[in-house]
Image (spheres, rainbow, N blue to C red):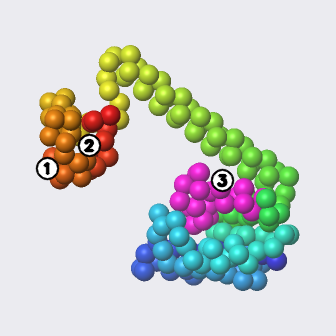
Amino acid sequence: MKVGYARVSTKDQDFALQRDALKNAGCKRIFSEKISGAKRERPQLQAAMNGLHPGDVLVVWKLDRLARSLRHLIEILEELDRREIGFLSITDSIDTTTAAGKLVFHIVGAMAEFERSLISQRTKAAMQCAKDQGLRLGRRPKLNEQQREHIRRMSKDDGLSLETIAALMSVSRSTVWRAIG
């Protein structure tokens, strides 16, 4: 069975074009919702996904109606593939029920993985370069060396508790613990 999913982003937009295309593609049920594509939680998409069975086909008018990003699209298509459910994007001519459509899906997936790998490599290289130049990575320390020394004295000499020192210094107990450590 073909199941359609239609989405519009704003209240001013209309489902008519998508619904007509989904009906012409042979969809027996159509789930539709007005919600931003940036929202991860989409109740009608989830309902459509939950109602699909092996051998069914999820049909959308266009890829951008289904996913927020390439990564999100790949996640959805991989789930459909795992569940032995086909996918059809009408305007993008992607049909995973055919050999050519599966090839396109795998090429897109490989490209997304390649992109993630390149981003990771560039990030690691930039971090190593920064370290080599003596730059400190991460969040700035909450306390400077004088403040840390003051905390150590309050703990050792004055015998104050971590909670008391934290309140006096306006920091968390764990910050005081790290300074004493």
Disc 1: CA contacts within 10 A as few (<14), some (14-19) or many (>=20):
few
Residue on which disc 1 sits: 168
Q: CA distance from mark 3 to mark 2?
A: 45 Å
Disc 3: CA contacts within 10 A as few (<14), some (14-19) or many (>=20):
some
Number of dots carrying numbers: 3
Q: Are marks 3 and 1 in contact (CB under 8 Å)?
A: no
- Point out the frontmost of discs 3 and 1: 1
Report the amino acid beneath label 2.
Answer: Val
In x, y percent, where is residue 19?
63, 80
Say whether residue 17 is visible: no
- Quarter of image, res 127: top left
Residue 52 vs residue 134, the one in the foreground: 134
In x, y percent, where is residue 14?
50, 80
Residue on which disc 2 sits: 176
Q: CA distance from mark 2 to mark 1?
A: 11 Å
Residue 40 vs residue 157, the one in the foreground: 157
Check the picture and name the quadrant holding the N terminus.
bottom right
Please name the residue shown 26% across and 43% down the image: 176
- Quarter of image, res 137: top left
- Provide the secondary structure element on which disc 3 rests: helix
Q: Residue 64: within the magenta? A: yes
In x, y percent, where is residue 52?
76, 74
Q: CA distance from mark 3 to mark 1?
A: 51 Å
- Magenta part of the protein: which range? 62-81
In x, y percent, where is residue 152?
21, 34
Report the amino acid beneath label 1.
Answer: Leu
User: Which of the two discs, 3 and 1, labels the residue nearer the N terminus?
Assistant: 3
* Disc ID at residue 74: 3
